[in-house]
Image (spheres, rainbow, N blue to C red):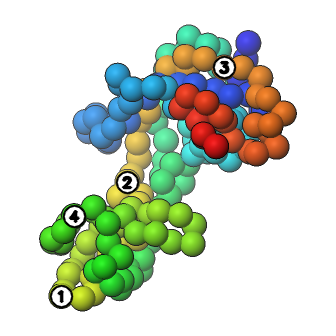
Amino acid sequence: MSIKDDMVVQFNYTLRDEAGEVLETNEGLDPIAYLHGHDNMMPGVENAIAGREIGDKFSVTLPPEQTYGVRNEDAEQRVSVKHLQGAKVWKAGMRALINTDQGQRQVTIIKVGKFMATVDVNHPLAGRELTFDLDVVDARDATNEEIAHGHAHGVGGHHH
């Protein structure tokens, strides 16, 4: 069964940087599940999985435009320290979560004062060419409810 739009796809991954160092993996965890063709996955990964079969294992190296985006050097903002989540004491270089209108966002602390912090709102992996080792472990036709909701349900997907 070839992967196509309106299918729930489950996969495992290992993410490597330009030097081949492992940045992330879901090894030992539940597979990632997403609804193919509904903008639920970064474009480069979704395009690489399209047309594949269950059991396919492969690697794909992607430019920033197809993963976390190109770095915007003007992407600094000042935020109240009380809005930073993830630690009690903040230092330059640390990563924090902040809530935005688009949901939670990871930021990097540039400078921190008593009440305000300057943060870089670029994703920490923005601007980097990344390699994904992918293993397609399952795929099925999405239910009408999943298609209507625009996301996968169940293990590795969204829970209502």
Q: Amino acid at mark 3?
A: Ala
> Do residues under tags 4 and 2 come within 8 Å of each other at their CB atoms?
no
Q: Quadrant of residue 126?
A: bottom left
Closer mark to the observer between disc 2 and disc 1: 1
The residue to which callout 1 is attached is 114
- First reached walking from the N terminus: tag 2 or tag 3: 2
Q: Amino acid at mark 2?
A: Leu
Which residue is located at x 82 percent, y 43 percent?
148
Secondary structure found at label 3: strand
Please tell me which of labels 4 and 3 falls first in the chain.
Answer: 4
Q: Position of residue 129 (x, y in %)?
A: 41, 46
Residue depth check, mark 4 versus mark 3: number of the one nearer the observer:
4
Tell me which label, 2 or 1, sits earlier in the chain: 1
Mark 1 and mark 3: Cα distance apart in space: 50 Å
- Residue on which the image places disc 3: 139
Lower position in the chain sequence, tag 4 or tag 2: 4
Task: Identify the secondary structure beneath mark 1.
Answer: loop
User: Could you tell me residue 92's position as x and y percent?
Assistant: 18, 72
